[in-house]
Image: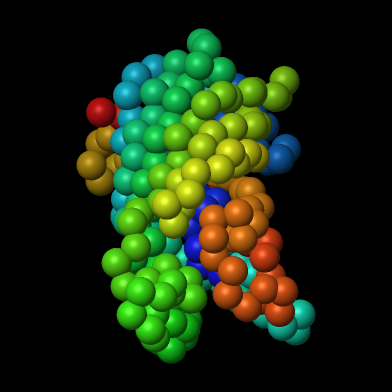
Amino acid sequence: MHRKFKAMLPVGAAAVAIAIAIPAIADNHGKAPDPSIPGQMDTSRVAAGSYATDPGHTLVSWKVSHFGFNDYIGLFGNITGTMQLDPVNPQAAKVDISIPVAEVTTASEGLTGHLLRAPKEEGGNPDFFGPEPDAARFVSTAVKVAENGTDATINGDLTLNGVTKPVTIDAKFSGAGTNPFNKKETVGFHGKTIIKRSDFGVMYGIPVVSDEVHLKISVAFEKQ
């Protein structure tokens, strides 16, 4: 279940999360922008260059159906990665995101432990990630920006549990501006995708714990 989440990132991951929808001007859903908010949906604020994630404010959440009764949600943080971005040519953007699966978080100590539990039998496979899982990684291969200039489709390769599969992220530009604390130019995106954890060899509990994992990405990139 968590592996599924990992796969979608990341990506991030966003990632791997990550969403890289590259800017054009948005109207903030018809509302006048609040000038006191540092980040605005204004693509004129976006500068070309190399960016790195703000790991303390970049997250990937995952959601699976549990027994068909309800959804269970978990989270990955401390996500690292880079983005190359030119607002004049947003479709040339590139993203490379790593998600530390070993730092998975849930609301249940028991479930978190199960996700990172060693196999019961020596040489067996863990139910989910195991005690020392490698980070998941999402590397973009193509970016297609919508006519509105703020939505994009990001195609890329997600590596999770030693398996690499193509993943598509629906991304949206969410804001740009200067972080008032560290004074860095920052660009933010939201992204979402669905992966099948079975594609990455995470089979435990299927189908009562859903094969499909819904991933949501919230990423902040800081200009380097």
Residue 92 position, x and y percent, is: 50, 16
Q: Quadrant of residue 91?
A: top right
Residue ranking furthest to the front: 123
Residue 31 position, x and y percent, is: 68, 40
Residue ranking furthest to the bottom: 110
- Identified at 25% across, 36% down, the residue is 183
Decide if residue 196 is on the left or right side of residue 139: right
- Identified at 42% across, 62% down, the residue is 76
Q: Is residue 151 above or below residue 59?
A: above
Residue ranking furthest to the right: 68
Decide if residue 21 is on the left or right side of residue 54: right
Residue 215 position, x and y percent, is: 59, 56
Residue 89 position, x and y percent, is: 52, 12
Q: Is residue 117 visible?
A: no
Which of 200 and 70 lies nearest the eye of the viewer? 200
Exactly how many numbered labels are in the figure?
0
Q: Is residue 7 above or below residue 168?
A: below
Which of 101 and 188 lies nearest the eye of the viewer? 101
- Identified at 50% across, 63% down, the residue is 3
Q: Is residue 96 visible?
A: yes
Colour mapping used in the image: rainbow
Name the quarter where the N terminus is drawn: bottom right
Name the quarter where the C terminus is drawn: top left
Q: Is residue 85 above or below residue 37?
A: above
Which of 10 and 179 lies nearest the eye of the viewer? 10
- Identified at 63% across, 39% down, the residue is 168
